[in-house]
Image (cartoon, rainbow, N blue to C red):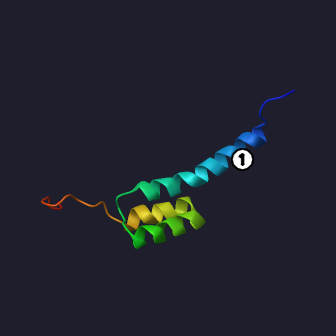
């Protein structure tokens, strides 16, 4: 008569899943400064959709000396 119900597991996964994009955006090297804060706000309110837009719009920062191909 104890343990975790399926509803409790679902709530935990939904809460944890909504914070993953926020953490990934915060740790990303794709944006810096005020731009990163803006992206964090967008991802906070839109979660995975905002993170997908972040990945599409921003580009990886290439080290100096390398050319794009």
Q: Is residue 1 above or below residue 33?
A: above
- Which residue shows up at 54% across the image and 58% down it? 48
Along the viewing direction, whichever of 37 and 55 lies nearer the viewer: 37
Residue at the farthest front position: 33
Q: Is residue 52 left or right of residue 58?
A: right
The quarter holding residue 62 reads: bottom left
The quarter holding residue 60 reads: bottom left
Q: Quadrant of the C terminus?
A: bottom left
How many numbered discs?
1
Q: Quadrant of the N terminus?
A: top right
Disc 1 on helix, strand or loop? helix
Along the viewing direction, whichever of 33 and 15 lies nearer the viewer: 33
Q: Position of residue 34 (x, y in %)?
A: 42, 73
Q: Position of residue 27 (x, y in %)?
A: 42, 54
The residue carrying mark 1 is: 11
Q: Position of residue 19 (x, y in %)?
A: 57, 53
Q: Position of residue 65 (x, y in %)?
A: 12, 60
Q: Is residue 23 left or right of residue 35?
A: right
- Which residue shows up at 52% across the image and 57% down it? 22
Q: Is residue 34 left or right of residue 7?
A: left
Residue at the farthest right position: 1
Along the viewing direction, whichever of 48 and 27 lies nearer the viewer: 27
- Which residue shows up at 37% across the image and 65% down it? 31
Q: Residues within 10 Å of mark 1 (few under 14, many from 20)?
A: few
């Amino acid at each position: 008569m104890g343990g975790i119900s399926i509803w409790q597991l679902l709530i935990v996964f939904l809460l944890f899943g909504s914070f993953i994009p926020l953490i990934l955006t915060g740790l990303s090297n794709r944006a810096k400064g005020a731009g990163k804060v803006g992206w964090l706000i967008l991802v906070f309110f839109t979660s995975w959709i905002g993170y997908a837009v972040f990945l599409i719009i921003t580009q990886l920062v290439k080290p100096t000396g390398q050319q794009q191909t």
